[in-house]
Image: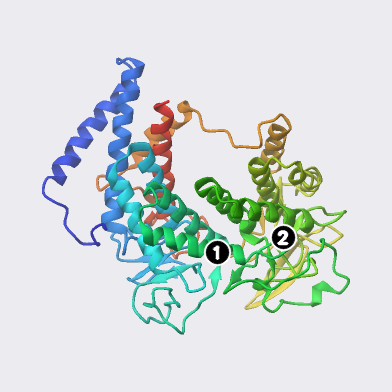
Amino acid sequence: MGKRRGDKWPSGWKLFVSTYHVLLLLAVGSFAGGVAADDRLELQRGSVRRAMTRAASYFFSEVSVHGGYVYHYSPDLKTRWGEGLAGPEQIWVQPPATPTVGMAYLTAFHATQDPLFLQAAEAAGQALLYGQLRSGGWRNMVDFQPRARQSADYRNGQGNPRGSNASSLDDGQTQTVLRFLMQLDQALEFRQPAIHEAVEYASQAVLAAQFQSGGFPQVFTGPVPVVPPCTANYPGYDWKTEGKIKNYWEMYTLNDNHCGYLAELLREGYRIYADERYRHALEKLGDFLISSQMPQPQPGWAQQYNFAMQPIWARKFEPPGIAGRETEEAVETLLLIHSVTGDARYLQPIPAALDWLRRSQLNDGKIARYYELKTNRPLYMQRAGDEYRLTYEDTELPGHYGWKTVSRVGELQARWRRVQSGQHGLEERESLAVLTQAAAGIIDQLDPQGRWLSTYAGERLVGQPKFRQGEEYLSSERFSRHLTTLAQFLEASAE
């Protein structure tokens, strides 16, 4: 495991930094000309590897706590943010925290074979193993302080036995951890028994949380009840006055790319272990998306459904409308499932959904998060204190939620056309030219300490930390994205 914050670097590190800058200047200068193209590319590959090593060495040895990470950090690392301020012994599970960073390390390891990256990834994996719940999955954070108030009922017995045992699939929490651990298990050649066993334990729990219809709840503590499948339909009652549904998290969920995260997990399980359980569950998930597509005049998807497959309320600002973003995510998930199974059934819902998305675009080219059932009018909320009121007006929207998003219907339509032409809907890889330019910019942004610092400019960030305008901070998401891009450059330039 890497050093904890405050540990000093070994002697010679400053010399390494100085040498790195000399080499970097030589490499960047050579991009302008005067050196053969192959030599320039090799110089940049060397610069990229050194930048990856510096950035990962700093992040692993100075930023990690017990091998894990949160979302954001003050530059001096004294203040850490997850969903709110994080304690000194806490790490975050929900992306883009510990499993996201871990997967970036693995991508770097595969591109370089440098054991530093595998060591950092394994430390992240061990941190996540500590926080595995008795129910098999994970919640949004792990607290390493024994019996702490926010500690949960960890499977290792070192948590709070009175704490939560609810494994969460919300925002990709359990899915992303398990997907990372599968990849780590493979990178370690399945020789680390604790990791391999934790993957199997978690996989069994997730598979047992799939309903007969193929859908999943938002959280689970054990196997789900047997519920007869049915097809989506409009509620026959006054949904506007129904209010928040009790225990909606135990019912069918699509909110926040729920099914997309699950599909990626099941695809990864099938790819790594060649286990038919994962493929079967993936096919059942596709069946659920077919049956949960709403009928005309709104052939999209809602965020949550009851067991009668009717859209329902969740939180008090989440009404049972047809959801623009979740419909885009459902289309994307169906394309992914088809790419694995080759079954044309999973493509059948897509044309009607794309047509609905096109005709539901707002005047500014965006899509609303909610559209009223049957009328298809964009539906919003206004807030007064802790109370919310449904409205058709898009003024004075609460700032804590994405009420509108940029429409992706053009991108999805292009992917659909590629499927029709036999390309299976897979995303095209970035060209070497694009990656070369991106890599040069990423290296240039790395500071002398090996950090990619960000400056807050008023944007909405995951976890909503309380930054001031112009304040600098470290971001796990940015670190992971940059390290992954540099690794992708190395792989593309080696082909």
Q: Position of residue 222 (x, y in %)?
A: 58, 73
Secondary structure of the residue carrying tag 2 is loop
Q: Which residue position holds label 2?
A: 394
Kindly identify the amino acid type of the residue bearing the numbered disc 2: Asp
Q: Position of residue 129 (x, y in %)?
A: 40, 65
Q: Report the front residue among 233 and 133.
A: 133
Kindly identify the amino acid type of the residue bearing the numbered disc 1: Gln
Q: Is residue 166 above or below residue 495?
A: below
Q: Position of residue 387 (x, y in %)?
A: 67, 77
Q: Residue sitting at 46 percent across and 26 percent down?
A: 433
Q: Is residue 394 left or right of residue 209?
A: right
Tell me which numbered mark, 2 or 1, is placed earlier along the sequence.
Answer: 1
**The N terminus, quarter of image:** bottom left
Q: Position of residue 26 (x, y in %)?
A: 24, 26
Q: Residue sitting at 56 percent across and 49 percent down?
A: 270
Q: Is residue 406 above or below residue 221?
A: above
| Real-space CA distance between mark 2 and mark 1, rounded to the nearest whole angstrom | 44 Å
Q: Which residue position holds label 1?
A: 204
**The C terminus, quarter of image:** top left
Q: Is residue 281 left or right of residue 53?
A: right
